[in-house]
Each structure stands twice: as structure tokens, then as C-alpha cells.
Amino acid sequence: MSLAWMVSPLAAAESLCVDSAHAHPNANKTAAWNENTTVAWDEPVRLYEYSSNANPRMTEVPIRVFPPTMHQVGPSRVMPFDLSGELECDYPATTPNLLANFVRIVENEQLETGVSLAATSQTFYVIRGNGHSRTRNGTVGWGPGDMFVLPYLGDEADPVCTNAGAQCVVHSCVNEPAFGGCALYWVHDEPMLQYLGVRPSKQVRFEPAFYSAAAMSETVQSISNIAADGSSKNRRGILLGNAATLQTRTLTPTLWSLLNTIGPKSDQKPHKHNSVALDLAVVGSAEGGKPVYTRMGREIDSNGVVTEPVVARWETGGVFVTPPGWWHSHHNEGDEDAWVLPIQDAGIYTHQRTLDIRFADEEVARLHAGRSRGATIDVGTTMSSENLYHGLQHLKAGAMTIGSP
């Protein structure tokens, strides 16, 4: 039984509210209505006092590093980043909504990957090697730096695997001389469906997509690193989108991804967001060279610097987890460009208007001006912001009331 459903006698005494003197006016009617039912509807009920339970004690999403050595040696296999123990869930998960994996396929071998229940989205990024993957939508060839994304395609078409479900994919490694095996970074959203206890509908929500390394790199390189005012941009990267997600501009309805580059001897100032980031260091610290790393922490100081930081070093081909809401800054002390590919569940957050990306300089400026933005979306970025602004100007002398007095 999940720990979330367990209530100790002490916790119950402190947080459950059962007061017969102040019972709901329809309490007797409800009891009478339940008399002739065969289901004990009251058994799962828990009633919690609001103020002491509004922010329930939950385990944090932990900071973890998954080194590239995991996929550089050994037989063909899938290596899930399973943090279900830390997250207190009874299915494999790296974050509450996502499961990330390394996939190693030995040269001239095949390997099947699949999910146990179902996923709305699967994405595969090629860390190393050349090969191809056979899917229920055809076969796609790939090389280093390529990425492809698959939706739930229903169950009607014949599976491509002999012993796995409809979402199984067969990967073949044709050539990889460095470590004798191709390496993929595989992320999918099955944990979210496991939590909800659902399967996707038969409707194909988005079409499969292939993002070539050449097209992505060329697009990033075409972006100027100098802002309109002549200052250096804090970051230079591209969001990976799909024709089906034009509003959210995300990889799929659930997944979000960015290919971001950091120039030599440069820093990207802190920012934060409500989604968990699973960051793949595409190009990190050179062997024996100066470090590339991320500093992350719960707070920033009055100068916008992360306080009490945890430092995660970028190892090429390695992954690290950035918890939700933590401020984090990226730093490249080396002599070459560094590249990072975060994959997040931010498609869901963006759709809900709760992603709330904030940048340290803007946050500090607001606080120095005596303001603290509580809204999860800056009014300057909303479609109705101008009308809202003028409405607020008319009401600035007093509070705005919605509904009947």
C-alpha cells in the first residue's frame, strides 16, 4: 500500500476533523442513502485539517548524476534511472512524470525497448554510434546527435517485437568504433500514466518526428549571441517543437526539450522553473581540461547568485537531475563550446500555465523595486495582458472583486 494512504493514530488525531456538533446539514441523508449499497464508501475517506496539510510532507526529487561509463561498457541492455524509492512510488520513475534511461546496443546487435503500461510520448537521442530503429511507423536511421520522437500509435498495427507490447521499438547498432556499442538517451512519460491509472486514447495526438543533428546545430549556430542592445545574451539555444504543439512550442504535449550551447569561458546566469530537468551533457568537460558544470540551489542572494550550491559537473554523455523550483546556473571554464540537452515534463506545465520560468536578474530587479511577482505567468507574456493592464489601472485605487458581494 502506498505510504500516501497511511495515516497514523497520532496524525489522524492532529489532522482529521470529525465534529458531530458541526456536522454537514445533509450528513443524515447521506448515511441513509448509503444504507442499501453493498460498497463501504466511507472506508477510503480521509478528512484533513487544511492549514496543517495544505503543503503535505513529500520526498524531494533528488539530485542525481548518471555517468557516461554506464553506457560505455557491457552487453546490450536498457539502464533505467529508477528513483522510485526516493519518490515513494511503486513503479519505475526518474521524476514524478518521467522515466529516463540509457540504452546500449553492442555493435552488430539488436535490442528491444518498450514500456510496461503505455506512454503518450517517447523520445530517443543518439549519444553515440550509427544505426536504425524499427517502429510501428516505419524504420528510421540515425547517427550521433540525431533525435526522434514517437507518440502512442494505438494497438491495431502489428508490433515489431516478438515478446513486447505495441509500443516496443527494435534498435540496431551498425557502427560504433569508440566503445563497441551505440548509446541512446531514452525518456518517456509512462510514470505519469501509471500514477493516473490510464492509457492513451486511440487518437494519434502528434506525428512521429525526426530532428537531425545537422539541422539542429545549424539553427543554433545561426542565432546571434549578441542582443539588440549590444550586450551578450545569457543563453543561446533552440526549443524543439512539433506541428501539433504550436501553442506550447514543446516537443510533445507532455515533453519539452532544448538544445542549448554555452560558449567557452562564459556563464549562463541562474534561472528556475517548476518542471524537473533531466539534463544530458551532449558536450561537457574535455578530458583533463577545465570544467563545465551547473550550480544549483534552493535560493539566490540579492545579487542573483545561487547560495549554498550543489555542483553537477558535465561529463560528455552523462545525465544529471535538476529538481523543480531550484535555481541553477551553467558555467563553462573550458576553451570549446559546451552543449546540453534537457528533457522535461514542461509540456504539461506550459499547457497549465504553471511552468513559471524565472531569470535571476529579473527577479532581483523586481525585489529591489519592492515587488514580488506571485502570478505564474508574467502579464507581459499573456495574450490578454494589455486588456488586463488597463482594467487594473481603473481598479488600482482599490481591490478588484469578482462575483456577487
Image (cartoon, rainbow, N blue to C red):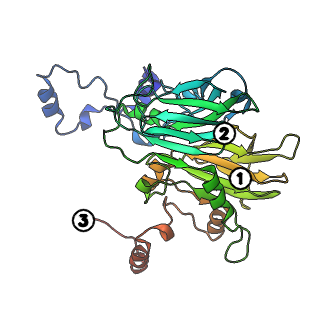
Residue at 86 percent across and 47 percent down: it is 290
Q: Position of residue 155 (x, y in %)?
A: 33, 31
Dots 3, 1 in contact, CB < 8 A: no
Q: Is residue 282 left or right of residue 351?
A: right
**Extreme residue in the right direction:** 288
- Label annotation for residue 404: 3
Point out the tag, 3 or 1, that comes first from the N-terminus: 1
Which one is nearer the viewer's eye here, 269 or 230? 230
Which one is nearer the viewer's eye here, 347 or 113? 113
Q: Position of residue 389 (x, y in %)?
A: 44, 76
Classify mark 3: residues with Cα within 10 Å, few (<14), some (14-19) or many (20+): few
Q: How many marks?
A: 3
Point out the tag, 3 or 2, that comes first from the N-terminus: 2
For badge 1, the amino acid type reads Ser
Q: Secondary structure at mark 2?
A: strand
> How far apart are the alpha carbons under marks 3 and 2?
59 Å
Q: Closer to the observer: label 1 or label 2?
A: 2
Q: Closer to the observer: label 3 or label 1?
A: 1
Please name the residue that numbered disc 1 is placed on.
329
Q: Position of residue 166 (x, y in %)?
A: 39, 29
> How far apart are the alpha carbons under marks 1 and 2?
24 Å
- Label annotation for residue 127: 2
Q: Secondary structure at mark 1?
A: strand
